[in-house]
Amino acid sequence: MSKSNTISQGQGRFIGMDLSDKQGTVVGLDPEGRVVEEGVVAMTPAGVDRYFGRRERARIAIEAGTHSPWVSRALEAAGHEVIVANSRQIPLIFRSNRKNDRVDAASLARLARLDPQLLHPMKHRSQTAQEDLAVLRSRDALVRVRTSLINHVRGTVKALGHRLPSCSAASFAARAGDLIPEGLRPALDSVVEMIAGLTARIGDYDGKVEELARTRYREAGVMRQVNGVGPLTSLAFVLTLEDPAKFRRSRDVGAFLGLTPRQRQSGATNLQLRISKAGDAFLRRLLVQCAHYVLGPFGQDCDLRRWGMKLASAKTRKRAIAAVARKLAVLLHRLWATGEVYEPLRQAAIAA
């Protein structure tokens, strides 16, 4: 952000706002750090505009959460400098022994006055990307519900000594519906009908995903060159990252998505722990599913599979899956940023 668009310590007001479901608590500081303002804001677009719409430009710090995307856009539209803080990275807030809305708002304001980088600032995606990503997340919610219902049917039947045949979730209602024991039909027929309805709705969402990838996000097509990466993962990748240029190196994407190991280094001790899981959980799960496919029986022979299989023989398969997912994220970003044609065995050809 350029100097002309920022608030410095010697000018303007520094405001921290703690967002709850129905109202936000506001604490404002003057350039010397004195509390000069306290108030509450209704968590509605009209309430935010009424409080912040017609006032001198300020630097406003808010915590990332449910309301922070639309609140940050509303504040920026009103001409303010907005910092969205990652509170999980700020021990002063989430580990405080005196934790209430006013104290949190005051802490945000003081950190925003001293140095915005202390807030570990985040950048929310655009409203259009958020709306399109909601299509993918709604599909995912239906898939989760369907899986839960299928497990319920299988478990209920198994408890009476019967077993339903193995099949895909999409074909479960058609294949298993007629095999339910007669005594369990009053309990399970409606559940099977609901599973069939969910499968149809999931198919509708699949069509919407394909249409978005074909018409609005054509750049996702370059990622589908990689075997195991379909329209869902490629579109989620584009919508979550939005702009490949915001990463200086493709390797930074792994850390952004929480796929790099946490570290704890002190003196001669340097421990590597489990992955941080700090990024977007939905996209991370999709990449892990792709990694399972790459290393599975149907995975295509490629550099990534060979590297992952070698790693799986030296370490646990779980670590190999996480490593392949991280390397896949780097590969997808590279393809997106350069538009290159994917060569599955490029490294093998160079080595040969």
Image (tube, rainbow, N blue to C red):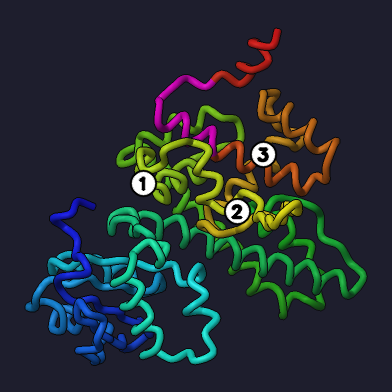
Give left or right: position of 218 versus 298: left
Q: Position of residue 131 (x, y in %)?
A: 33, 59
State the residue at coordinates (86%, 62%).
163
Q: From the image, which quarter does the C terminus lie in?
A: top right
Vertical placement of residue 112 versus 173, above or below: below
Residue type at mark 2? Arg
Please check the rendered image and state whether residue 112 is part of the magenta-colored stretch, yes or no. no
- Residue 276 vs residue 162, the one in the foreground: 276
Residue furthest right in the image: 161
Residue type at mark 3? Val
The magenta segment is 330-342
Q: Which mark is residue 324?
A: 3
Vertical placement of residue 214 versus 63, above or below: above
Kindly identify which residue carries mark 1. Answer: 242
Circle 3: element type: helix
State the residue at coordinates (87%, 74%).
159
Kindly identify which residue carries mark 2. Answer: 285
Between the residue at mark 3 and the residue at mark 1, the CA separation in whole angstroms equals 22 Å
Q: Position of residue 32 (x, y in %)?
A: 22, 79
Give left or right: position of 292 versus 332: right
Which mark sits nearer the N-terminus, 2 or 1? 1
Vertical placement of residue 204 versus 103, above or below: above
Which mark sits nearer the N-terminus, 3 or 2? 2
